[in-house]
């Protein structure tokens, strides 16, 4: 009986030791996943800021385009269709439209980058939560194994 109890104790000790290692690995994975989540969150914030900047620049370019268009219409309404200033305003309007188009493209590109970064952040968050759950599960299994080890030790002492 004592030999069997000692064998059970040794088996429980080996199992508890293996679970101790597993729990440590799962905790390390959870910490790494959490670090990746924080990094992804920072990247998403940066992407959001760049998208906001591009949107603001697009808005300013649209306003400049509108202003040039209004000035052109005002000059045309005053009968100055062939003036040098009107030609200059038409040139400004073309440049403003080009700039507006460039910022629309950049704004769309930055919005797509933000969407991608946000998706990556959510995926990292899900992985971190999954890793934390796995670490908790491993820790609980370790606690149960340690309780069984304690019980095996007591059985061994009684049997001896």
Image (tube, rainbow, N blue to C red):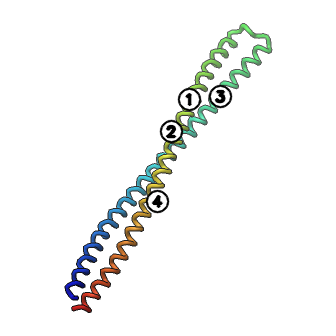
Q: Can residue 48 be seen in this view?
A: yes
Q: Earlier in the sequence, mark 4 or mark 1?
A: 1
Q: Give whichever of 13, 73 is nearer the camera.
A: 13
Whole-number angstrom distance, CA of label 2 to CA of label 1: 12 Å
Q: Which of marks 2 and 1 is nearer the N terminus?
A: 1
Distance, label 4 to label 1, CA atoms, is 36 Å
Q: How far apart are marks 2 and 3 (CA)?
A: 22 Å
Does residue 41 appear anywhere in the picture?
Answer: no
Mark 2 vs mark 4, CA separation in Å: 24 Å
SS class of the residue under badge 1? Answer: helix
Q: Which residue is drawn at 22% across and 80% down?
A: 7
Give the position of the N terminus as an image quadrant.
bottom left
Q: Is residue 28 left or right of residue 128?
A: left
Residue 97, percent from left and from top: 62, 22
- Write down the residue under mark 1: 105
Which class describes the residues within 10 Å of circle 3: few (<14), some (14-19), or many (20+)? some
Image quarter of residue 127: bottom left
Instruction: Look at mark 3 in the image and give the residue it sits on.
Output: 62
* Residue underneath mark 4: 129
Q: Residues within 10 Å of mark 4 (few under 14, many from 20)?
A: some
Count residues near mark 1 (Cα–Cα under 10 Å), then give few for <14, some for 14-19, many for 20+.
some
Q: Is residue 5 above or below residue 51?
A: below
| Total number of numbered discs in the rendering | 4
State the CA–CA distance, disc 4 to disc 3.
Answer: 44 Å
The disc at residue 76 is: none
Mark 3 secondary-structure assignment: helix
Quarter occupied by residue 83:
top right
């Amino acid at each position: 009986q004592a030999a069997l109890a000692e064998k059970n104790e040794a088996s429980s000790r080996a199992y508890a030791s293996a679970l101790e290692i597993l729990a440590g690995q799962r905790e390390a994975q959870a910490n790494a996943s959490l670090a990746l989540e924080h990094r992804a969150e920072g990247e998403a914030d940066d992407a959001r800021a760049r998208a906001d900047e591009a949107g603001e620049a697009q808005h300013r370019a649209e306003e400049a385009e509108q202003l040039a268009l209004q000035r052109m219409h005002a000059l045309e309404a005053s009968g100055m269709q062939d003036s040098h200033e009107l030609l200059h305003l038409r040139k400004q309007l073309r440049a403003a439209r080009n700039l507006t188009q460039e910022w629309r493209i950049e704004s769309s590109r930055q919005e797509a980058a933000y969407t991608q970064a946000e998706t990556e952040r959510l995926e990292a968050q899900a992985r971190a939560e999954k890793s934390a759950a796995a670490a908790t599960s491993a820790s609980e299994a370790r606690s149960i194994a340690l309780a069984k080890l304690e019980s095996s030790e007591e059985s061994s002492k009684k049997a001896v």
